[in-house]
Image: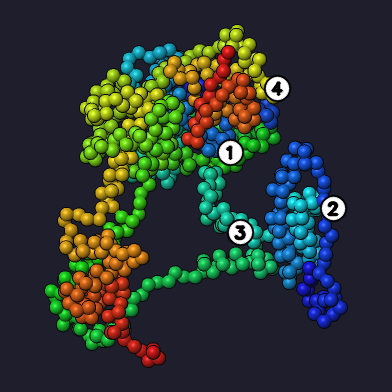
Amino acid sequence: MKNYQDGEYDAFSHRAAIPLLQIPAAEPLLCDANDWHARFETVKSTFSSRVGQISNAALDRSIIAYDENADAKEKERCRRETETLAILTGLEIDSAKSGIKPDLSEYLGAKNISRSRFLKYKNLLERADEPKKWYEPDFSEQLEAYFKKTDWSKVSSNVERLPYLAYMLKKNTPKAKCRPAKASELFTFAVTPGWEKALDINKLEKLLALTETYTSCLRRIRANRFTVKDKAKRRDIDRILFTREEDIDADALYALFADVAPVRITKLRAAIRAERWHLMPADRRTLFLLEHIPELTQYHELLSDFRFGGYRLLGDVVCDLDDIYRSNNSTRLHFNTDTPDMTALVNAYVNKPLGVTYRDAVNEQCRVLVAQITTLSDAVRYVVALGKRAFLWEVLMQEAEKYILKKDGDE
Amino acid sequence: MTNEWNEFRAYTVAPTYFCADGNDLSFLGRFTMNMFLKNIGFARIFTALARGYLFHEPDGSIRDGDPYSRADYARRALCAWCSVPDDKKSANKAEWKAGSDFRTLHSEFPELVDENGGGWYYRHVHAVADFIGANLKTVSRTVYKLADNIGEFDAMWRKKVVQYQVPLFAEGTKGDFLMHFDDAVADALQLGALRCESVTLSPEQEAFVRSVTTDGVPEKITRTLAEYYLANKTDDSEWVLLPQTNLDAYFGSTAFTKMYLPKLPHTFMERRESNLGVSMYKVKFE
């Protein structure tokens, strides 16, 4: 261990020649391997290392020790204690082998040095995602309180001020506003006023339709890629079956209803709610089931047993399946009413080769479609006139580059 | 614990707030701090309330007529019990949204909700918090948390009450294990009238319980578990659902689940655990 404090460390002084500090290992504590209690204690102490606590205590002290504005005497004391704690860390690690734990009572637990604000901040951030109880302030409130509680003008250590500076920086930085440059500042063809008038209205309309198809195709693909959590009520079903000691499990129950057509599932769900299945007297339940799911007669008894929340079995399965069918519908890629362009774009995603991103695949197909309307370089003018900048950069980047207006100083 | 009518009364009659010393938590009523702070154990409370209003006259005698026709009445009783007075923010919300202030039910359930919309539970929680505030020196420090945070309670409970009213099997409800008033009413109809007398053990059963009760576990706990088992055992199963939170509330503190339950000997009872948030038990009567 070396001390780097000003004036005390000099590479050419005799002190530099002193070898690094060597701490003799503690005499190991010998225990009888057949004594089960001693074994247990050994294992326990191996897993109860206090290195983390020592490090925190050392950081608290080092913040004062290396704070240029702190009181000199206090600085010196904290510096020594930080060094002692560094040695104690070594002893604590050794204790896993020797069985002898260093005495830390002077440093841990005693509150003579207050916890560093930096550690408090770190702790706060680490617990940001933990769900909060209703009686606890939420993360933003805690953070607000943390910054409010302290008079930051009196905090002299820079490490401690760091969270505050970051917070103020974020607070005082205005949000960047998006101001797209005018077309005349970007493209060579747009310099002359009235350039849009020369464009073919027919091509303009076709390209407008294509850009819209392109956007809705991407939206459809994103919805398809996002998978919903299905069978949300499986646990509830398992719980009911567990308390009733039934042989059947939730998966088997879902499988039973798999053959019932989606339309009938939706109808059944509506009927469950309209006729208030959960409040139905026992004698009417079988009739209800016979009307809606006659093919599952052998399970009617299971489903109409309402003990331990049994009314939820039918409802849970039907609701889950209905939700799955609905989400399948909303994540469908092809619809009968699609235009040929839409079908082509979606197919580009469906048949995309491995390793190609869905955007690249759709963009490539879109270029083919643009080429059917007009040449790719010509299309740049139309897309700029339509104001579809995102489409331009995504699909026609190569062609657009040719028209970029170069200013003095640009290469 | 086996006299369910008494349990119903514990949730509907105005409690007296008294605390003898730091170990006395009786001023919480038939609740624990965990129930107040974590909103747990309400399924059983709601079911008990619904059974009381479906099947009983105010004096405890059985009501005439078809209980199924009173399902909506029982649901209204639950709304009244849970009612929270509106504040400025919640009073102005759209009409179609579920409310949480049921002062209109005061004439139907004067014992459950007052004319200002304060439901029984709302008044109880505030009374407990006030009691803690007034008796800081006597009460245990463990309850300070409720009094310290009572300002947050109304907003939280308002949200819960709206959640409880979500109809069963409604579209767009994602969470499972959510409690609905519909569940409570359906369970109540299934369970039938409340038991109005306690179940007592036969001399042989009494002797068995005494013989298996080990040191460190009060006999009240083993006896109550044995009685509850007898009272709720069905013919087709030897297992009975263990309502841990509500047993804690009955015994007066969470010592039951935390200290005594793990200590109960296998000669007395066996448990069937699951990772589904419920556990079953059976008492091994000789």
- Residue beneath label 1, please? B146
First along the sequence among labels 2 and 3: 2
Please name whichever residue, A208 or B64, is drawn nearer the observer in this view of the structure: A208
The answer to whether residue A32 is left or right of residue A310 is right
Looking at the image, is B136 positioned above or below residue B13? below
The residue type indicated by label 3 comes to Lys
The residue type indicated by label 2 comes to Glu
Q: Are marks 4 and 3 on the same chain?
A: no
The answer to whether residue A393 is left or right of residue A20 is left
**Residue A195 x, y percent position in the rendering:** 20, 83
First along the sequence among labels 1 and 4: 1
**Residue A272 x, y percent position in the rendering:** 28, 32
Q: Residue at x 16, y 56 (%)?
A: A337
- Residue beneath label 4, please? B215
Q: Are marks 2 and 4 on the same chain?
A: no
Please name whichever residue, A77 or B152, is drawn nearer the observer in this view of the structure: A77
**Residue B148 x, y percent position in the rendering:** 60, 42
Q: Are the two marked residues, 4 and 3, in contact with CB atoms closer than 8 angstroms?
A: no
In the picture, which quadrant includes the N terminus of chain A? bottom right
Q: Are the two marked residues, 2 and 3, in contact with CB atoms closer than 8 angstroms?
A: no
In the picture, which quadrant includes the C terminus of chain A? bottom left
- Check the image and name the residue furthest to the right: A14
Q: Residues within 10 Å of mark 2 (few under 14, many from 20)?
A: few
| Residue A26 shows up from this direction | yes
Looking at the image, is mark 1 or mark 2 nearer the viewer?
2
Q: Are marks 1 and 2 on the same chain?
A: no
Looking at the image, is mark 2 or mark 3 nearer the viewer?
2
